[in-house]
Amino acid sequence: MDNLVEDGRIDPTCVLGQDVFLAPDVWLGPFVVLEDGVRVDERTHVDAGVFVGRACHIGRDCRLEAGCVIREGVRLGDRVVVQSGAVVGADGFGFVEVGGVHHKIPQVGTVDIGDDVVIGVNTCIDRATTGCTRVGAGTVLGSLVQIGHNCELGPQCQLGPQVGVAGSCQLVEDVHLGAGVGVGPHLTLGAGARVEARAGVARDVPAGAHLAGFPARPVGDVACLERFLDQAPALLERLGALEDRLGGRGGSVS
């Protein structure tokens, strides 16, 4: 590695474990840590302060921005961008309560990120309890997104900032979630589904559906409900006037 330090490709402050493989034209910034068995393929750029855990594989033409964390055993495809503060492969949220005490369930799976994926600032993608959490090729994740353990995101999905997807969900393909959408656990969102910002998804979503609101409903139903709510004060006033008229004539309203 000495020749790589001398030609400026690896900053001398980097810490490299045993059996690290660096392909041609890899660039490592200051204070990068690559643990044992890491492989970094051609032309990948790793900014200052990045941590890559043991036995990770980072593909070609990737960019790992300053301060992101790639935990042990994770695989990144080619041309992946991981923005600052993102964590890929932290333990999934798994606990069991025994005698009123929360006991941690070991998270022994991994994460597989497809080609051309963009992972936003401070986004977290949890490793699987067993098996693999997957993000498909071409998927884009905004800032502050949370992907739970054992989720499978298909290709070309788009998740806006602050989206939360609970564990074991499947987003089939080309699913778009607006900012702040929450998706409950063990749900399937069909190909081409669209969910508007701040909606809460509590049941499976058919392919091609367009949902909004909390709980999420078809956008047409939400529009009708909103029109009714806009008219509700006037309707209540008319109802009150009608009750007054009926009461003045000796009638009753039950």
Image (cartoon, rainbow, N blue to C red):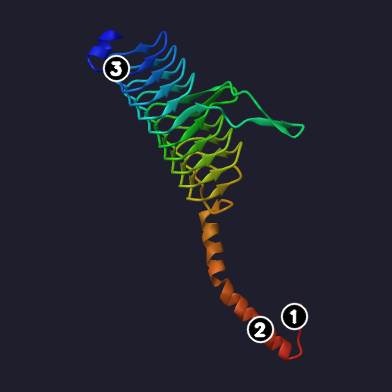
Residue 244 as seen in the image, left or right of residue 170: right
Q: Position of residue 79 (x, y in %)?
A: 34, 26
Q: Which residue is mark 2?
A: 242
**Label 1: few (<14), some or many (≥20) within 10 Å?**
few
**Which residue occupies 60% across, 79% down?**
237
Q: Position of residue 171 (x, y in %)?
A: 51, 36
Q: Which residue is mark 3?
A: 10
Q: Could you tell which of marks 2 and 1 lies nearer the N-terminus?
A: 2
Which residue occupies the foreground of this view, 175 or 27? 27
Which residue occupies the foreground of this view, 192 or 252? 252
The picture quadrant where one finds residue 250 is bottom right
Q: Could you tell which of marks 3 and 1 lies nearer the N-terminus?
A: 3
- Real-space Cα distance between discs 2 and 1? 9 Å
**Which residue occupies 72% across, 91% down?**
248
Circle 2: element type? helix
Quadrant for the C terminus in the image: bottom right
Quadrant for the N terminus in the image: top left
Which residue occupies the foreground of this view, 104 or 218? 104
**Label 2: few (<14), some or many (≥20) within 10 Å?**
few
Residue 106 as seen in the image, left or right of residue 207: right
- Real-space Cα distance between discs 3 and 1? 83 Å
Q: Which residue is mark 1?
A: 253
Residue type at mark 3?
Answer: Ile
Q: Could you tell which of marks 3 and 2 lies nearer the N-terminus?
A: 3
Q: Position of residue 114 (x, y in %)?
A: 42, 26
- Real-space Cα distance between discs 3 and 2? 82 Å
Are discs 2 and 1 less than 8 Å apart at CB? yes
